[in-house]
Amino acid sequence: MNVKPEWIAALQALTGHETDMIRWNGLVCRYEFVMAGADGIPRSQFWADFSKPKDPETGLQPYRALTDDTMREALANLERTFVGNPFDGNGSTQREVGRRYFFNKRLQEARWKARGQEYADFIWDHRRHIRDAGAGPLVTVATELR
């Protein structure tokens, strides 16, 4: 499948990396967008039709042709979601990383709180078994010596 040079140029103009490219991946029969992330490591995204369900045999989204119109759609989507887009995307990399960090931190705290509540409920539900298991049999002890 042919990838037009102007598509690659438009992608590189959007991301600012000369190494970013679009290629046909014959293994999965999809167009592959290879772009450097915020850390500079190239990562792949496959062009497919995400509005339809996955193929049950392969687990892949259905094939979607890459034309001039769909390329404009892909670039518009990348512009909106690009981490380094300061205009209407996620903003600065620092802000996006901070947003993700605090989201995960709140999620972790909620999980810890839920687990603590489950443990407290377990202790409450089994309080008699726990008390009796630790104390052993009750024995009367004389308090006076003769």
Image: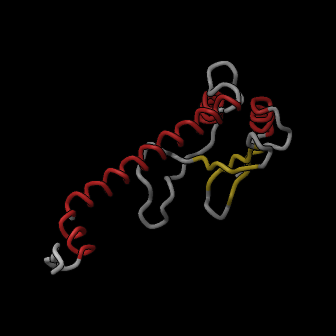
Query: Which of the 4 image quadrants contains residue 71?
Result: top right
Residue 120 appears left or right of 23: left
Along the line of sight, the residue nearer the viewer: 41 or 64: 41
**Which residue lies at the image location 51% right of the left edge and 58% below the top edge?**
60
Query: Which of the 4 image quadrants contains residue 138?
Result: bottom left
Q: Is residue 73 above or below residue 54?
A: above
Rendering coords of residue 137 (x, y %): 18, 79
Residue 23 appears left or right of 120: right
Residue furthest to the top: 87
**Which residue lies at the image location 44% right of the left edge and 67% below the top edge?**
57
Colouring of the image: secondary structure
Q: Is residue 76 above or below residue 136?
A: above
**Which residue lies at the image location 42% right of the left edge and 49% below the top edge?**
111
Label total for image: 0
Rendering coords of residue 117 (x, y %): 32, 50
Q: Is residue 14 above or below residue 38?
A: above
Along the line of sight, the residue nearer the viewer: 115 or 76: 115
Rendering coords of residue 25 (x, y %): 68, 58
**Considering the image in quadrants, where does the C terminus appear?**
bottom left
**Which residue lies at the image location 39% right of the left edge and 46% below the top edge?**
113
Rendering coords of residue 73 (x, y %): 59, 31
Query: Which of the 4 image quadrants contains residue 4?
Result: top right
Residue furthest to the front: 146
